[in-house]
Image (tube, rainbow, N blue to C red):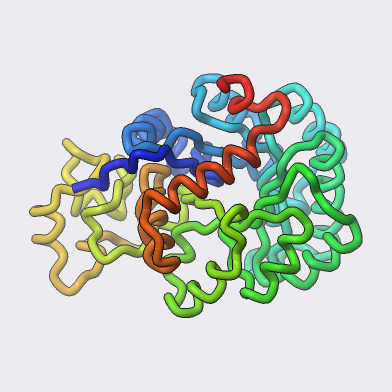
Amino acid sequence: MAMAATRTPLFDVHCHLQDNRIVDTAPSLIKAATKAGVKWMAVNGTSEADWEKVRQMSEHNSCIIPCFGLHPWWASQRSKDWLSKLRCMLESVPCSTVGEIGLCQSIRGREVEESIQVDVLRQQLKLARELERPAAIHCVRAFGSLQGLLEEMGSFPAGIILHSYSGSAEFVKVFAKHGAYFSFSGFNTHVNPQKARRVWQQVPRDRLLLETDCPDALPQVDDPTALFWVPGDPAVTAAVPSSNSDCCHEEELHSKSAGNGRGGIGKGALNQPANLRAILSHVASLLEVTEEVLADAVFTNASTLFSFPGSKLVDCS
């Protein structure tokens, strides 16, 4: 049985509904998320190739906040005029923010020279500050480099989001002084609870955000029937009835779950924004607060961050 929505609306500050793995089912995923209480979804572009898809998704869905940026994985594939294209997109879509941008020293990230990543990130951060838009930053195993760049550039009054934050508790204070918010995703549910608690307890309550980072980062939960599944996902089709692919039928899933904590769900199962409450529940338990208290805090934080001039939140207020 899928989780019911909390009374306070939820805000998924980072997701990728334009991803080719789920774009065809995006309308149903948006509907499921709205039904689950997710009021806003910030859809982050990653390259010049998907910016237009993000723009169109925002035009057709009032709950979608469009974000345009060049992800570090694709920095070496940028066109000669990529920055002018990005500026044009941001200026022509005043409700948009900058993202996903950043630095990455994972195995995949190291395929792109760090110097290129830093230069591309610096230019995008300059643009975000000039246009007074928030920026969503991907940072994996590069927190020292990011610290150096932010100290070089100064503060960002419009705010930056350290999406799916995986840094140490010590770095929290370092980045907070530069206007950073710290967003936690399903990836963080796989972290040792004691370690996670040490980090999250250092985050100022007014800088805490939640995200799904879908279609990746499916949360790890004790009861897989509490999650929503993507229709047609081959990793779950054996366990989820096609007549109800938004969520799991408890009896059928448990009947397939012997010796498998995911109830027969394969590795790489796809995530969706409706699962944001599973992340909320996990973080609330670690911070030892109620889900409603945490939901209210993170929704207020996200609403403040995304209420820049021209944003959808300002227009509908």
Find residue 237 and report its horizontal and vertical position in percent.
24, 49
Residue 261 appears in which quarter of the rendering?
bottom left
Find residue 128 and report its horizontal and vertical position in percent.
80, 41
Depth check: give the residue in front, 141 or 11. 11
Q: Please give left or right for residue 207 compared with residue 289 in the image.
A: right
Q: Please give left or right for residue 22 compared with residue 86 in the image.
A: left
x 47%, y 50%: residue = 212
Can you name the residue that lies furthest to the right here? 152
Residue 235 appears in which quarter of the rendering?
bottom left
Depth check: give the residue in front, 289 or 138. 289
Depth check: give the residue in front, 153 or 57. 153
Depth check: give the residue in front, 60 or 62. 62
Give above or below for 82 relative to 213.
above
x 51%, y 37%: residue = 41
x 77%, y 60%: residue = 177
x 27%, y 40%: residue = 246
Q: Is residue 176 visible?
A: yes
Q: Is residue 25 visible?
A: no
Report the number of numbered marks: 0
Residue 272 appears in which quarter of the rendering?
top left
Find residue 10 and report its horizontal and vertical position in percent.
44, 41
Find residue 169 and report its horizontal and vertical position in percent.
62, 74
Quarter of the figure that contains the C terminus: top right
Q: Please give left or right for residue 150 compared with residue 232 in the image.
A: right
